[in-house]
């Protein structure tokens, strides 16, 4: 149960690097002068959407996956390393990686929603496994 947690954390760092590898050159090309008094997000909203998609996804990886980390680590501590739970954990991680790659490159919302919903449902089943392990 620990390996999927580590892989998703690593993937979050990959997205962080990708975000800045596209954002910093875009800021330079635009000639933007960073203004600490500008409201949060206002200046970044002027960057091309293909640049912002990476940042949007990085933010997504700091949201729902926090529940995954808690549930997967709880399952590990509760001793549930069953094949079913491990497969669910890897499925969740795989769906999140595909969602990230899709959002950062193509960003078609209906497909992105399907990937997000699939990962969310997988996480719900994993959470129910943790509830079962507690009982």
Image (cartoon, rainbow, N blue to C red):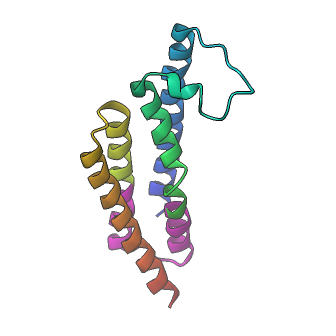
Q: Residue at x 49, y 66 (%)?
A: 72
Q: Can the viewer see residue 35 in this picture?
A: yes
Determine the residue positioned at 50% across, 16% down.
26
Quarter where residue 24 is shown? top right
For the point 67% across and 33% down, which residue is it?
39
Q: How many numbered dots are placed on residues in this image?
A: 0
Q: Is residue 10 visible?
A: no
Where residue 64 sits: x, y (%)? 49, 58
98 to 38, vertically: above or below:
below
Residue closer to the observer: 88 or 35: 35
Q: Is residue 59 left or right of residue 113?
A: right
- Viewer-proximal residue among 116 and 96: 116
User: Residue 41 sits in which quadrant?
Assistant: top right
Whether residue 12 is situated above or below residue 129 in the rendered picture: above
Q: Nearer the viewer, residue 81 or 120?
A: 120
Tell me if residue 135 comes above or below residue 21 in the rendering.
below
Q: Is residue 38 positioned above or below 68 on the image?
A: above
Point out residue 55 in the picture as x, y percentages from the top left corner: 50, 35
Q: Is residue 84 magenta?
A: yes
Report the residue that reaches farthest toward the right. 37
Viewer-side residue, 47 vs 95: 47
Name the spot of residue 65 as percent of width and height, x first: 49, 56
Left or right of 121, for residue 70: right
Range of residues picked out in magenta: 68-92
- Residue 33, how many percent across, how many down? 66, 13
Any magenta on residue 126? no
Q: Which residue does the image show at 44% across and 86% down from the upper left?
A: 132
Magenta span dominant secondary structure: helix
């Amino acid at each position: 149960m620990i390996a999927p947690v580590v892989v998703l954390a690593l993937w979050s760092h990959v997205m962080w690097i990708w975000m800045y590898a596209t954002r910093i050159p875009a800021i330079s090309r635009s000639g933007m002068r960073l203004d600490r008094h500008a409201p949060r997000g206002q200046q970044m909203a002027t960057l091309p959407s293909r640049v912002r998609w990476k940042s949007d996804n990085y933010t997504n990886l700091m949201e729902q996956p926090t529940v995954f980390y808690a549930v997967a680590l709880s399952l590990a501590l509760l001793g549930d390393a069953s094949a079913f739970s491990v497969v669910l954990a890897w499925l969740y991680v795989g769906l999140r990686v595909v969602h990230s790659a899709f959002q950062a490159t193509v960003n078609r919302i209906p497909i992105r929603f399907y990937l997000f919903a699939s990962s969310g449902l997988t996480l719900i089943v994993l959470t129910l496994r943790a509830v079962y392990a507690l009982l």
